[in-house]
């Protein structure tokens, strides 16, 4: 029996190949967002459309950001062996830590740390860990319910 194309095949193709536009990809867990995002980044780097220090990829959780970084490194290594743009991919691997791959709150914290005066925030602020943030949210929610 032949595999049927996925219902979102066109959207997946756009993620991988429409390299001249910024995209926001929203989908449920386990649907292939990381796979498509990694393929997009590899295509950007291999085509020379972007350098690794121009990449910004954000997720919501530390776990997802860590997985994204690992898979990006693995796929860069794999792509390097079968691609014509060897110099671009070698450079990307050597400078991968210059890519901004992380969480949305980490990215926002970086921006705020760069411009604390303009943002009117204490330059020594820290981002809460996920357990701390959950605890604070639960407290605020409980207070809201009491009112």
Image (cartoon, helix red, strand yellow):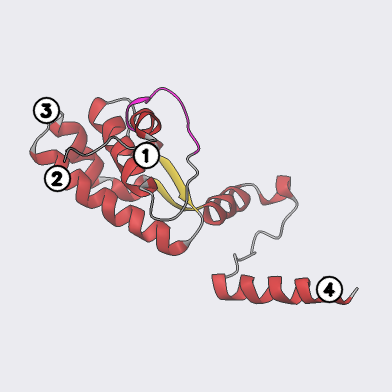
Does residue 47 lie above or below 128 as drawn?
above
> Where the C terminus falls, by quadrant?
bottom right
Q: Which mark is residue 53?
A: 1
User: Closer to the camera, 101 or 141?
Assistant: 141
Please say if the residues under marks 3 and 1 sit with CB atoms less than 8 Å apart: no
Tag in front: 2 or 1 = 2
Q: Residues within 10 Å of mark 3 (few under 14, many from 20)?
A: few
Q: Which mark is residue 84?
A: 3
Q: Which residues are magenta?
A: 16-24
First in residue order: circle 3 vs circle 2 = 2
Please say if the residues under marks 4 and 2 sit with CB atoms less than 8 Å apart: no
Q: Is residue 97 left or right of residue 142?
A: left
Q: Secondary structure at mark 3?
A: loop
Q: Please tell me which residue is depicted at 27% across the width and 53% down the height of the picture.
A: 71
Q: Is residue 32 left or right of residue 117?
A: left
Q: Secondary structure at mark 2?
A: helix
Q: List x then y, in percent, for residue 123.
A: 65, 59
Q: List x then y, in percent, for residue 99.
A: 37, 45
Q: Which residue lies under the disc numbered 2?
A: 78
First in residue order: circle 3 vs circle 1 = 1
> Where the N terminus falls, by quadrant?
top left
Residue 18 drawn in magenta: yes
Q: For residue 52, what is the image quadrant?
A: top left
How many labels, in total? 4
Q: List x then y, in percent, for residue 129.
A: 55, 71
Q: Secondary structure at mark 4?
A: helix
Tag in front: 3 or 1 = 3
First in residue order: circle 4 vs circle 1 = 1
Residue 82 drawn in magenta: no
């Amino acid at each position: 029996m032949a595999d049927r194309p996925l219902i979102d095949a066109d959207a997946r193709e756009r993620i991988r190949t429409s390299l001249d536009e910024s995209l926001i990809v929203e989908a449920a867990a386990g649907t292939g967002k990381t796979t498509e995002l990694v393929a997009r980044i590899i295509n950007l780097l291999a085509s020379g459309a972007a350098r690794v220090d121009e990449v910004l990829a954000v997720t919501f959780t530390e776990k997802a950001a860590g997985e994204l970084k690992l898979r990006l490194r693995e796929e860069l290594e794999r792509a390097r062996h079968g691609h014509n743009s060897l110099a671009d991919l070698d450079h990307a691997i050597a400078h991968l830590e210059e890519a901004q791959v992380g969480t949305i709150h980490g990215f926002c914290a970086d921006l705020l740390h760069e411009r604390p005066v303009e943002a009117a925030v204490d330059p020594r602020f820290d981002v809460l860990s996920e357990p701390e943030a959950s605890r604070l949210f639960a407290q605020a929610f409980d207070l809201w319910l009491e009112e």
